Amino acid sequence: QVHLVESGGGLVQPGGSLKLSCAASGFNFSRYALGWERQAPGKERELVAGITTSGDSTSYSPSVKGRFTISRDNVKRTMYLQMNSLKPKNTAVYFCNAVSAYEDSSYWGQGIQVTVSS
C-alpha cells in the first residue's frame, strides 16, 4: 500500500534543466523527512539532497549545491527536485526516499532514469 513514484526523468542536453517529482501514498507523508538519491552505473548509491518534514531546512551533496533545489508539498504529498545546469556526470537513476526515526521506517521509489548527453 506504500507507494513512492518518481516522474519527470528523461534525456536532456548538458546545461539543460529537468524537474523530478515523487508522488507518495500509503503512509504519513508529513512525518517523514525526504530525500533524493542516485546511482550511476558502477557507482555506489549517493544522497543528492534532503529536506525536513516541514520543509524548513534542506541539505545537498556538494556536487549539486547551487544547481539543484529540493522542495516538498505536504498537501499534495509530493516532493520535487529541480535540476539546473545539468552535466553528463549527473546521469544516473534517481530514487526518492522517505525516512522517519519516530516510525523507525523508510521507503524508496523504484527510480527513474536521468540522462545528460549531447
Image: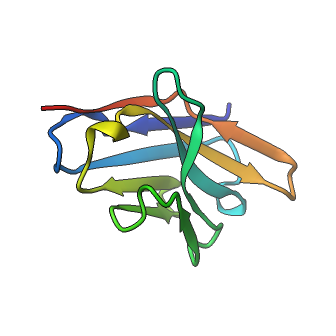
Residue depicted at x 63% and y 36%: 108
Pick the residue in front: 15 or 4: 15
78 left or right of 106 in image: left
Q: Quadrant of the C terminus?
A: top left
Residue depicted at x 48% and y 54%: 79
Please say if 103 is above or below 72. Answer: above
> Looking at the image, which residue sits at the far bottom?
56
Q: Quadrant of the N terminus?
A: top right
Residue 24 found in image quarter: top right
Residue depicted at x 78% and y 54%: 100
Pick the residue in front: 55 or 90: 90
Relative image position of residue 13 (x, y in whole percent): 14, 39
Residue depicted at x 57% and y 78%: 56
114 left or right of 74 in image: left
Please say if 22 is above or below 83. Answer: above
Report the coloring of the rendering.
rainbow
72 left or right of 57 in image: left
Relative image position of residue 81 (x, y in whole percent): 40, 54
- What is the total number of numbered labels drawn onto the structure image? 0
Pick the residue in front: 23 or 80: 80
Relative image position of residue 20 (x, y in whole percent): 36, 46
